[in-house]
Image (tube, rainbow, N blue to C red):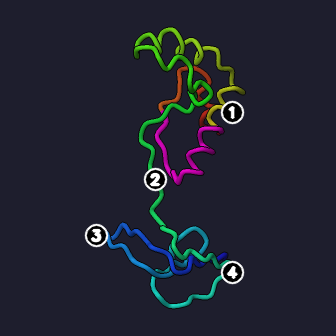
């Protein structure tokens, strides 16, 4: 069992009152064990003074297969962008390029606080997205 204590944080809760608290948050393994002002003992202590702890973000619509295509013809109208750029590029993915496109997108999401996602995937090599 590993414990981590975030000390003196501003904590945005998801309780029914949607309280915002200042205090300590103790995590045991991957679950929040306690929130309060007392000093809990922990394996790792993180000074979170002046920092905000928020719940993980949920990305409900993403196309990880398109991560590598950013900036491609952003000046086109939607249907031209799809038909002339995105669909041909998606069609050119092989399992490896799709895997790395998804890995890059997932890494960016994690760095931004996303903990869950719903991916629209693509029509070919979808298993590579799941593998990533």
| Residue that mark 3 sits on | 16
Whole-angstrom CA distance, mark 3 to mark 4, is 30 Å
Q: Which residue is mark 1?
A: 100
Image position of 16 (left or right of 32)? left
Task: Give how far across and how far down residue 101 sits, in percent.
Answer: 64, 31
- Give the residue drawn at x 62%, y 24%: 125
Residue 18: horizontal and vertical position, in percent? 31, 69
Q: Upstream in the sequence, badge 1 or badge 3?
A: 3
Residue at position x 47%, y 31% in the image: 120
Say left or right for 8 vs 1.
left
- Mark with earlier residue (2, 4): 4
Decide: is 68 above or below 42: above
Task: Tell me the residue at 49%/20% (across/down).
Answer: 74
Quarter of the image for the C terminus: give it: top right
- Asked if the residues shown at circle 1 and circle 3 are in contact, with their CB atoms under 8 angstroms apart, the answer is no
Q: CA distance from mark 3 to mark 2?
A: 18 Å
Q: Is residue 74 magenta?
A: no
Alpha carbon separation for disc pair 2 and 4: 26 Å
Q: Earlier in the sequence, mark 3 or mark 4?
A: 3
Q: Which structural element holds mark 1? A: helix
Q: Position of residue 65 (x, y in %)?
A: 58, 28
Residue lying at 72% horizontally and 27% vertically, measured from the top left: 96
Judged from the image, the secondary structure of the residue bearing numbered disc 3 is loop
Residue 93, position as x, y percentages in the image: 65, 20
**How crowded is the residue under tag 4: few (<14 C-alpha within 10 Å), some, or many (20+)?**
few
In whole angstroms, how far apart are the C-alphas of marks 1 and 2?
Answer: 22 Å
Task: Specify few, some or many for label 1: CA neighbours under 10 Å numbering under 14, 14-19, or 20 or more.
Answer: some
Q: Which residue matches tag 4?
A: 43
Instruction: Determine which quarter of the picture holds residue 102.
Output: top right
Q: Is residue 117 left or right of residue 77?
A: right
To which residue does mark 2 refer?
Answer: 57
Magenta span: 103-119
């Amino acid at each position: 069992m590993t414990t981590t204590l975030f000390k003196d944080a501003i904590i945005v809760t998801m309780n029914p009152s949607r309280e915002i608290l200042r205090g300590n948050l103790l995590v045991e393994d991957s679950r929040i064990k306690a929130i309060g002002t007392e000093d809990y003992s922990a394996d790792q202590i993180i000074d979170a003074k002046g920092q905000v702890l928020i719940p993980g973000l949920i990305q409900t619509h993403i196309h990880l297969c398109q991560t590598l295509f950013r900036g491609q013809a952003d000046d086109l109208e939607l249907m031209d962008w799809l038909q002339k750029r995105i669909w041909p590029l998606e069609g050119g993915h092989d399992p490896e390029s799709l895997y790395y496109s998804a890995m890059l997108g997932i890494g960016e999401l994690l760095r931004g606080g996303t903990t869950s996602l719903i991916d629209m995937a693509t029509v070919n090599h979808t298993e590579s997205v799941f593998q990533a």
